[in-house]
Image: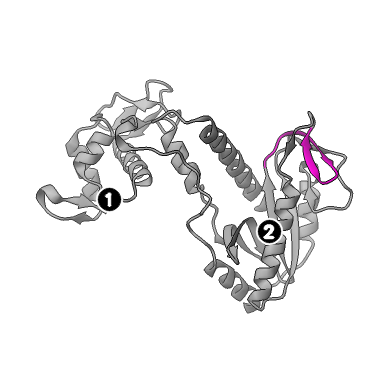
């Protein structure tokens, strides 16, 4: 049973929303690529893990804190006798371990994911001890991308390579698990400590006046222009989208980038650059949001 679904990180959502509206610098562009690649791998992991059959409680994207130190857990699977801690990586290409260092085939050193896994394991053990919870913890570093190879991989390690995924799942499925109230309380305790707002978010500064206005195509990221009675059509990729769906997406986009600002008909009309009639925006707002204020002071929540 999945107790906490995986969601796209807010930092990734913001960067994706900014990408067509401004020039992202090199740092933000690299960060966007890394976040997209990581999330894509986690989604692939979730798809693979649907083959897991024993009774379990699954918590995804768990952000915890211990003595001022934050740590992220990609997936935590609670079974009858243990916690399975999964660190998921979506690397591709050839890599190797050089002692304590993790390197590409060309010799470039990158952050060692084994260190990340060890750090999360250590902090989680301490947290569980502080809570008076004693349970076996099994850490695993899963390389989900089929194009990944780890040369000179150690025989005994928590690493699960792409070629080992099916066998690893078969082994997990052979272990029986029957959940009790003990596992439920453990899950509830961890969920209650989850930090919703990540302190690690890194996005470039931006202001409303400096961002490009318009309705963005959900398919290709271009700007939508032509529309008929019911649909908007992208001149770049040919995709069509209903007017109502496009307006709702545009409103969501604005609220994501400017969470502290009031949403009004005129604000959204300006945000979508007048592509759609203001009466259409007003109708969609009234149908989908709570009206606050009156006349010129009307806004929507």
Q: Is residue 51 visible?
A: no
In the rendered image, residue 96, in percent from the top left (x then y), is placed at 82, 38
In the rendered image, residue 98, in percent from the top left (x then y), is placed at 84, 40
Is residue 85 depicted above or below 96 in this figure? below
Q: Which residue occupies 60% across, 76% down? A: 185
**Numbered range of the magenta stretch:** 90-104
Q: Is residue 287 magenta?
A: no
Give the quadrant of the C terminus: bottom left
Main SS class of the magenta portion in the image = strand
Q: Secondary structure at mark 2?
A: helix
The Cα–Cα distance between marks 1 and 2, rounded to whole angstroms, is: 41 Å
Mark closer to the observer (1, 2): 2
Is residue 283 depicted above or below 92 in this figure? below
Residue 200 in the figure: left or right of residue 152: left
Identify the residue position indicated by label 2 in the image: 120
Q: Which residue occupies 53% across, 32% down? A: 29
Identify the residue position indicated by label 1 in the image: 288
In the rendered image, residue 36, in percent from the top left (x then y), is placed at 56, 39
């Amino acid at each position: 049973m999945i107790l906490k679904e995986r969601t796209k990180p807010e930092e990734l959502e913001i960067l994706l929303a900014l990408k067509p509206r401004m020039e992202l610098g090199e740092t933000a562009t690299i960060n966007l690529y890394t976040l997209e690649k990581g999330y894509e791998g986690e989604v692939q992991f979730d798809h693979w893990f649907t083959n897991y059959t024993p009774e379990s409680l699954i918590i995804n994207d768990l952000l915890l804190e211990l003595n001022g130190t934050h740590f992220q857990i990609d997936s935590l699977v609670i079974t009858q006798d243990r916690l399975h801690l999964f660190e998921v990586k979506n690397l591709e290409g050839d890599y190797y371990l050089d002692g304590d260092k993790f390197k590409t085939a060309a010799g470039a050193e990158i952050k060692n994911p084994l260190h990340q896994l060890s750090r999360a394991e250590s902090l989680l053990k301490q947290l569980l001890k502080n809570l008076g919870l004693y349970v076996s913890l099994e850490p695993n570093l899963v390389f989900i991308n089929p194009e990944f190879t780890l040369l000179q991989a150690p025989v005994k390690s928590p690493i699960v390579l792409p070629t080992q995924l099916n066998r690893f799942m078969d082994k997990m499925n052979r272990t029986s698990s029957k959940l009790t109230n003990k596992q439920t309380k453990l899950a509830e305790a961890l969920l209650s400590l989850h930090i919703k707002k990540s302190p690690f978010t890194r996005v470039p500064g931006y202001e409303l006046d400096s961002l490009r206005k318009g309705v963005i195509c959900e398919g290709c990221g271009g700007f939508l222009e032509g529309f008929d009675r019911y649909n908007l059509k992208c001149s770049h990729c040919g995709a069509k989208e209903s007017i109502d769906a496009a307006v709702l997406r545009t409103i969501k986009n604005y609220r994501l980038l400017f969470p502290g600002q009031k949403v009004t008909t005129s604000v959204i009309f300006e945000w979508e650059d007048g592509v759609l009639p203001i009466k259409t925006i007003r109708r969609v707002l009234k149908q989908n949001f709570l009206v606050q204020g009156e006349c010129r002071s009307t806004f929507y929540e």
